[in-house]
Amino acid sequence: MRGLSGRPARGHAGTVRGRFALLREERGGIAVMLALLMPILFGAAAIGIDTAAVWSARQQVQTGADAAVIAVATDCARGNCGDIKKTAEDAFWANDEAAKLSDLGPGEGWISANTGTRKVSATQKKDWVVNHFFAAALGYDTGTLAVSSYARWAPTAKARVEIPLAISYCAYRQLAGTLGSKTPVQLAETAPSPGGACTGPAGQSLNGGISLFAADAGSCATRTVLNGTYSMTLGTLAGGCTNAYLASLIGRDVTIPVWAEEPGATFRVYGYAAFRVTGFSLTAGDRKLQGYFTRSARQIDDPTPPATPAPDLGANDVFLTKD
């Protein structure tokens, strides 16, 4: 059969063969393009997934390092740095999940404590090795990471005190004794002049004394700050200081403001002592706290030492710093 032009007409089979040939060519082109793009795809995956894995590992190792310096600084603030290597290692492994992963090679670090500057440092000695997943296909099997952490401790300069009870510098000197000796004492509001008279830290004559002061509304606790002035309550105990509340403080360290100027209706905070509560009484005419003065440490979020240094009376703050 011929067409109008006199040439044989194309049949349907020829058209289908042409399409199949065209599809084979397209599939071949896609395969070549995919082969060319594979390194780019693996590279993108390496950048995304492997980089995220390194970042996650770094954060967790950093958490472990932070825990290590805080643990050592806490011991030092309590008066005995002890075995800082063991303390740091125990805290690190208890808080660093990344270090337990099979794809993270162990690193090594240095830990040091300086009681003169009240500073603890954790620095890298040998980097951690991170095993890559995707980047390994491109010849980059591992990456490294290094962290450092620093902590300090300083005498407390502001505190939300658990009980609205303050004492004079003279009473503190007489009752505190040697911090850490656990000498039992009673802080009784009915004591006439506990501590007697003494010479204050500024060289002035000062009388002893113990006094209740105003607490936050509906609470037994109140916020105080170094050099802040607070009203004495002349024997009136805050309503929030119930038997149940005070019982919850047994076995804990509470913060006691200390004054070092002769008070009137108010007193000014000179510093903070730490008192371990072992018992109490709310009996009328015999209200008292039982326990002993000690050294305590609590972690705070502020990364800078207090602007006005406080005297070291036993209560200390521990905090992370940038260096």
Image (cartoon, helix red, strand yellow):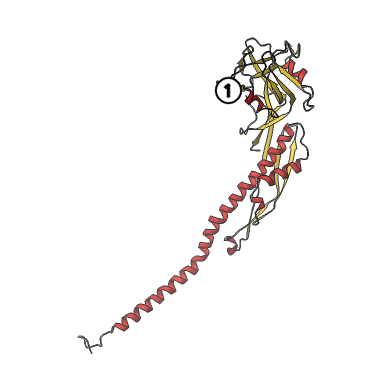
**Location of residue 63 in the rendering, given as x and y in whole percent from the top left corner:** 64, 44
Q: Is residue 162 visible?
A: no
User: Which residue extends farthest left?
Assistant: 4
Q: Quadrant of the C terminus?
A: top right
**Location of residue 291 in the rendering, given as x and y in whole percent from the top left corner:** 73, 24
Q: In the picture, residue 296 is in which quadrant?
A: top right
Q: In the picture, residue 200 is in which quadrant?
A: top right
Q: Quadrant of the N terminus?
A: bottom left
Instruction: Please tell me whether mark 1 sits on a helix, a strand or a loop.
Output: loop
Amino acid type, label 1? Ser
Give the class, few, some or many, for how many residues have Cα within 10 Å of label 1's Cα (few <14, many ≥20).
Answer: some
Q: In the picture, residue 149 is in which quadrant?
A: top right
The correct choice, above or below, for 27 with respect to 300 in the image is below
Name the residue nearer the viewer: 210 or 59. 210
Q: Which residue is found at the position 67% from the left and 39% from the top?
A: 150
The correct choice, above or below, for 153 with respect to 170 in the image is below
Tag 1 residue: 219
Name the residue nearer the viewer: 250 or 111. 250
Q: Which residue is found at the position 67% from the left and 41% from the top?
A: 67
**Location of residue 312 in the rendering, given as x and y in whole percent from the top left corner:** 72, 25
**Location of residue 168 in the rendering, given as x and y in whole percent from the top left corner:** 71, 16
Name the residue nearer the viewer: 243 or 261. 243
Q: Is residue 267 visible?
A: yes
